[in-house]
Amino acid sequence: HSSLPTPFAFSLIKHISLCLSLLTFCSDLRHFSSFLSVDPSFERRIMAVSSREDFVYMAKLAEQAERYEEMVEFMEKVAAAADGSEITVEERNLLSVAYKNVIGARRASWRIISSIEQKEESRG
């Protein structure tokens, strides 16, 4: 089992590097978000990744890019590829990190909304 990234992974790394470079030139994150949208052909290539090791590698890349929802998707594919066998400790930890960050962001949003709601109710 090789730990070298596949040619596809190199393509993704170049895409992520481009996005990070663009971030330095964008003063407004809404403007930057348009660069983060993935074109359909690129998305099809992502879906073509099929080996369990590639899914783990893609999950690690998603983690580094702080794209935790995509990390969850890749780790769900790892679990499906396990086909009833146990996942490894590394895979379990990646799955845990992915869900922890997705849920953490949602909890933070919920706290903000609840706080705003309480302020509105106290005003009458």
Image (cartoon, rainbow, N blue to C red):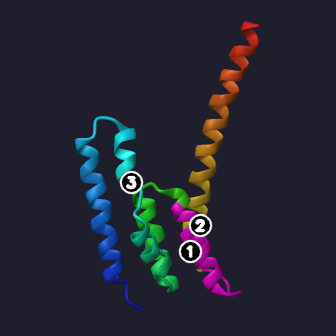
Viewer-proximal residue among 46 and 110: 46
State the residue at coordinates (59%, 80%).
88
At mark 3, the secondary structure is: helix
Three-letter amino acid code at disc 1? Glu
The disc, 3 or 2, on the residue closer to the chain's N-terminal end is: 3
The quarter of the picture where residue 57 lies is bottom left
Residue at image coords 27%, 40%: 26
* Element carrying mark 1: helix
Q: Please, what is the three-letter code of the amino acid marked with disc 3?
A: Leu
Residue placed most toward the observer, 88 or 19: 19
Q: What whole-number distance in Å separates the C-alpha atoms at marks 3 and 2? A: 23 Å
Q: Which residue is mark 3?
A: 36
In the image: residue 121, left or right of residue 8: right
Location of residue 94 in the rendering, given as x and y in whole percent from the top left corner: 54, 67
Residue picked out by circle 1 = 91
Main secondary structure type of the part rendered in magenta: helix
Residue range corresponding to the magenta coloring: 70-87
As drawn, 44 above or below 28:
below
Q: Amino acid at mark 2?
A: Leu
Residue drawn at 56 percent across, 52 percent down: 101
Q: Is residue 83 left or right of residue 16?
A: right
Q: Along the polypeptide, which appears first: circle 1 or circle 3?
A: 3
Evaluate if marks 3 and 2 touch, with contact meaning CB atoms under 8 Å apart. Answer: no
Q: Is residue 64 magenta?
A: no
Please tell me the numbered disc located at residue 2. Answer: none
Callout 1–callout 2 Cβ contact below 8 Å: yes
Is 86 a magenta residue? Answer: yes
- What residue would you read off at disc 2? 95
Residues tagged 1 and 3 counted as in contact (Cβ below 8 A): no
